[in-house]
Image (cartoon, rainbow, N blue to C red):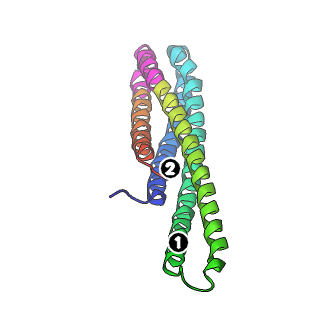
Amino acid sequence: MSQPMFVVAARIASHLHKATKIAENLSLTAKNAKAVTVRAGEQAAGFAALTDFIQELASSTISLAQAVNSIAINISMRATRLERVKLANCRFKLANHLGQDACFIADIQPFLQKTEATLKALQDEFIELLAKLNQLVEDTHRQIRSASVISTMSKVEASNSGPYKPQLEVISDNIAQAANAIRKELNCAESLLHSAKV
């Protein structure tokens, strides 16, 4: 049995919130990298060039993850409303069917039509929000793929940084771990997103 969409959307928002927190930690890693490269001077010149990319990656990942999370929360709220309108529509239809011979059954028609129109509008909004969410998750995935490249480049540069090598290798490992953790949360969110049904 599939879960109601508002539950799925809340779970997606949860995964994306975790990704945002990981990206915030990546931002701290970038600041640490900057501090180490300043102390290392010329010995870490190659790594220093990467610190701006790491910070930019962290900032843009945070922005994308927050935008995705905002849409996921909006979807969750819309899904809750959609479920309520579906329930109201079913009840109006049942009342209309059961009361076919009632003398005032025509009075229910405007309410039935209104819930059907609201249901259609909510479903359209919902589909549009799901498409936006999917696009943002894909954008965030592309962003995280670049983290893998930066991680690899930073490992190479760390190996050439003399006495600062251990510190810079730890930073490189932190970048790789953050990228993998964010990727894992995005994959979970994406899997939930693809299972979403209106």
Q: Residue at x 64, y 61 (%)?
A: 117
Asked whether residue 66 is in view, the answer is no
Q: Residue at x 53, y 79 (%)?
A: 100
Badge 2: residue crowd in 10 Å (few <14, some 14–19, many ≥20): many
Amino acid carrying label 1: it is: Lys
Q: Residue at x 66, y 79 (%)?
A: 107
| Residue 102 image position (x, y, % from top left) | 57, 85
In front here: 131 or 45?
Answer: 131
Q: Residue at x 60, y 30 (%)?
A: 56
Dot 2: what SS? Answer: helix
Q: Residue furthest bottom?
A: 103
Main SS of residues in magenta: helix
Q: Which mark is residue 93?
A: 1
Of the 4 image quadrants, the one containing the N terminus is bottom left
Amino acid carrying label 2: it is: His
| Residue 89 image position (x, y, % from top left) | 54, 69
Mark found first going from the N terminus, 2 or 1: 2
Assess whether residue 150 is covered by the magenta stretch: yes
155 displayed left or right of 133: left
Q: Which residues are magenta?
A: 148-170
| Residue 189 image position (x, y, % from top left) | 44, 45
Number of callouts: 2
Compared to 84, does 27 lie above or below? above
Q: Which numbered disc, 2 or 1, marks the residue closer to the eye?
A: 1
Whole-number angstrom distance, CA of label 2 to CA of label 1: 39 Å
Determine which residue is flagged by label 2: 17
